[in-house]
Amino acid sequence: MERLVIRGGRPLEGSTRIHGAKNAALPILAAVTMADGETVIRDVPNLDDIRVMLDILRSIGARVYYADRVVTVDPTGICTTDVPEHLMRMMRSSVFLMGPLLARFGNVRVSKPGGCSIGTRPIDFHVKGLARLGADIIDRHGYIECLATRLQGTTIFLDFPSVGATENLMMAASLAQGETIIGNAAREPEIKDLALFLQKMGAHIEGAGEDTIIIHGVERLHGCEFRVSPDRVVTGTMMIAGAITKGHIELENARSSDLAAVIMKLREAGVHVTTGNDIIEVKQTGTLQAVDRIQTAPYPGFPTDLQAPFMSLLTLAKGTSIISETIFEDRFQHVSELQRMGAAIKVDLRTAFIKGVRELSGAAVEATDLRAGAALVLAGLGAQGTTIVDRVYHIDRGYESLETQLHDLGANIMRLRDQPHADIAVAEV
Ligand code: UD1
């Protein structure tokens, strides 16, 4: 069992580089299965979710090399489109393989991903979209099998601008016959990144980043070289880390244009944010102020993935802030942990009322999911005393050695393995 131990109250100082985006890299790694040659992808973060995706690619016959954040995949040896259940279960994003494998090989079989701790997270939009593209779908015994000799271009209007469904369908449509129009598409920056990647492979895509995407299917896609865009959720997390510690930090390889909604709220809270060419500077000196209601929404709205981290910041802001979570039904599990640290938060269904307190006090808390875990680390950095965050594996799914990045900026944080809480309180961190 690994845990992070944080002694709070140290202002972060200095500069750090943001790694490539997990949420862009995952669908791109699925898309490489459609190439007829080798592909090289750079700045792929070394994360648990990425390693699972690489294991899946290996398990179906692709040759995969990964070192120094560079992935090389040769998919020519793929010999099955049956994604192993135990790997499927480890990561929801394995559903990204449905569209590409079906489009390239005419069939795919995956086990149905279950719900997860933040909500039920069905995949009905993915499946309905593939059916619209002409696939026969067999859904039984917990598996979904899709079959099609060649997918046929069509018009698909999504009930909700789902990020994953937009990506899956965009990939599948790239090798379909004729034109596909995806209406009410998600507009997240990761969609644009995937479209740029597919275009480099030879796909014809217009409108990625807007709510209507048009894909002109091609006969084949080839290998290419690509660099993944910076991770906007890690960027946002680090910005909040700078603010909550009353620090002064500079983030390199950070795209402010992807984070307009978050930067606006940080400034409203009194945080000084200066943006430049791939650089964001964060400086916090005075008292944090409560902000007007934050409502999570599809991009360009406030990202649900930064809802929990931002709540940690607001626990220390003067006045009462309100956060409404509209994307996932159960994404307030960090609240009870923040309350253990002295935060004053009330929850009414999917709205949280956060009354700022003068200080948080370190406590033993548990990460319940990836972003909730990051929120607790942030709270620990801003708290008085020692915070112990358990279940670090959740955090490792999306942050490449978060403690090293924070430590290099001056935080008092370390990872401990198999050490009881009682010993940690006195350990020199
Ligand atoms: C992606 C991100 C995740 C982020 C989320 C919302 C990746 C790997 N993950 O997840 O970090 O929190 O976008 O920005 O990119 N829905 C359905 N049926 C479907 C698909 C989705 O009902 O077939 C619902 C979901 O349950 C959820 C909402 O639509 O309530 C949004 O989900 P979606 O945009 O698909 O999120 P993901 O792609 O799973």
Image: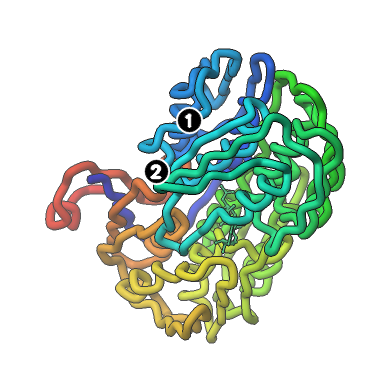
Looking at the picture, which amino acid does disc 2 mark? Answer: Arg
Image coords of residue 257 (percent x, y): 76, 53
Query: For the point 36% across and 37% down, which residue is it?
Result: 86
* Viewer-nearest of discs 1 and 2: 1
Give the residue at x 47% y 62%: 120
Left or right of residue 182: residue 9: left
Q: Is residue 334 visible?
A: yes
**Neighbour tally class for label 2: few under 14, some 14-19, many 20 plus, Cα within 10 Å:** some
Q: CA distance from mark 1 to mark 2?
A: 14 Å
The reply to whether dot 1 and dot 2 touch (C-beta < 8 Å) is no
In the picture, the quarter occupied by the N terminus is top left
Q: How many marks?
A: 2
Rendered residue at 61%/35% (across/down): 147
**Taking 365 as reference, is 207 above or below it?**
above
Q: Quadrant of residue 71?
A: top right
- At x 39%, y 68%, the residue is 333
In the picture, measured across the screen, residue 58 lies left or right of residue 306, that is left
Q: Amino acid at mark 1?
A: Asp
Residue 107: x percent and y percent?
Answer: 59, 31
The residue nearer to you, when weighing 266 against 407, is 266
Ligand 1 closer than 8 Å to label 2 CB: no
Disc assigned to residue 89: 2
Residue 227 x, y percent position in the rendering? 68, 29
Q: Which residue is mark 1?
A: 82
- Of 363 and 113, nearer the camera is 113
Please tell me whether residue 114 is drawn above or below residue 342 in the rendered image.
above
Please give left or right for residue 179 compared with residue 89 in the image. Answer: right
